[in-house]
Every structure is written in structure tokens, then in C-alpha cells.
Amino acid sequence: MLEAFCNLGYASSCSWAPAERDWDAVRVAVSAPEPSTSANRRVGMEYQPARVIRLIYVCERDHRPAVHGELWFDLAKAAWLCKHDDPRIQKMAECFLESYLKKNA
């Protein structure tokens, strides 16, 4: 049942999905900005790895972006600098980040 109706694409035929919902899907991607070379020259370094990971999220409704934004995580402090107000999206971001960090360790 889950595989056939609820786990593919937007799951429009899934009887468990609420009829009234803000979004059909939430997408998350990671962007770890490169440190600027001018900043590195000022502190006398050739290269400094990214310390902050930027997650970009997009909430889709009817196959179109409805809401989007950025979340920031400080790797050195292991703390969120910018969290999402909706705990569901924040949890998705945390799971995504955990998986990303395991794959790129």
C-alpha cells in the first residue's frame, strides 16, 4: 500500500495524506560556502575549510515552489545558527544534515 500509493512523487492517491496541507513535498539541499580568498589573505592562511553549512529548503505545492529559505549549521560548534520555525521542517533538515555528514566524513 505505501509503496504503491504513498511513497511515489506527490502521493496524490494516498488515503493517509491529509487533504488540507500547506505543502506536498519538502526538498533540502546543502551548500557549504567556500571561504573567501581575500579573508584568508588577511589572516595569512592559504585555505580554511568551510565552518558553516548552509541548507536550502523548498516547500512545494501542486508541483510549484511555495515557500523557500535557508538554514545554517555551525560545524565547529555543532549548533544551528538559524533554525526553521516549523519543527517538522527543522527535523527534516536535521535528518538530511546527519545523512550528508555521514556520507562526507
Image (cartoon, grey):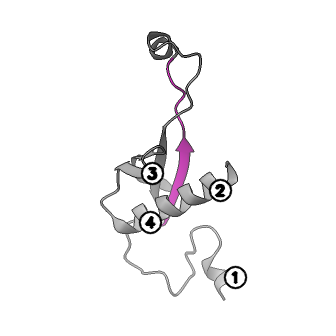
Task: Measure how far apart labels 3 and 4 are at the Cα level.
Answer: 15 Å
For the question of whether residue 45 can be seen, the reply is yes
The N terminus appears in which quarter of the rendering?
A: bottom right
Neighbour tally class for label 1: few under 14, some 14-19, many 20 plus, Cα within 10 Å = few
* Marks 2 and 4, how far apart at CA: 17 Å
Choose the circle earlier in sequence order: 1 or 3: 1
Which amino acid is tagged 3?
A: Ala
**Would you say 34 lies left or right of 7 here?**
left
Q: What residue span does the magenta drawing correspond to? A: 24-36
Tell me what residue is drawn at x 42 percent, y 47 percent: 77
Q: Residues within 10 Å of mark 2 (few under 14, many from 20)?
A: few
Residue at horizontal 49 percent and vertical 10 percent from the top: 41
**Which residue bears the numbered disc 4?**
91
Q: Residue at x 61, y 52 (%)?
A: 101
Q: Which is closer to the viewer, label 1 or label 3? A: 3
What is the total number of numbered labels drawn onto the structure image? 4
Q: What's the CA distance linking mark 4 and mark 1?
A: 26 Å
- Can the viewer see residue 62? no
Q: Which residue is mark 2?
A: 102
Q: Amino acid at mark 1?
A: Ala
**Three-letter residue code for mark 2:** Lys
The percent position of residue 46, horizontal first and vertical second, equals: 59, 16
The residue pinned by badge 1 equals 4
* Residue 39 location (% of width, % of height): 45, 16
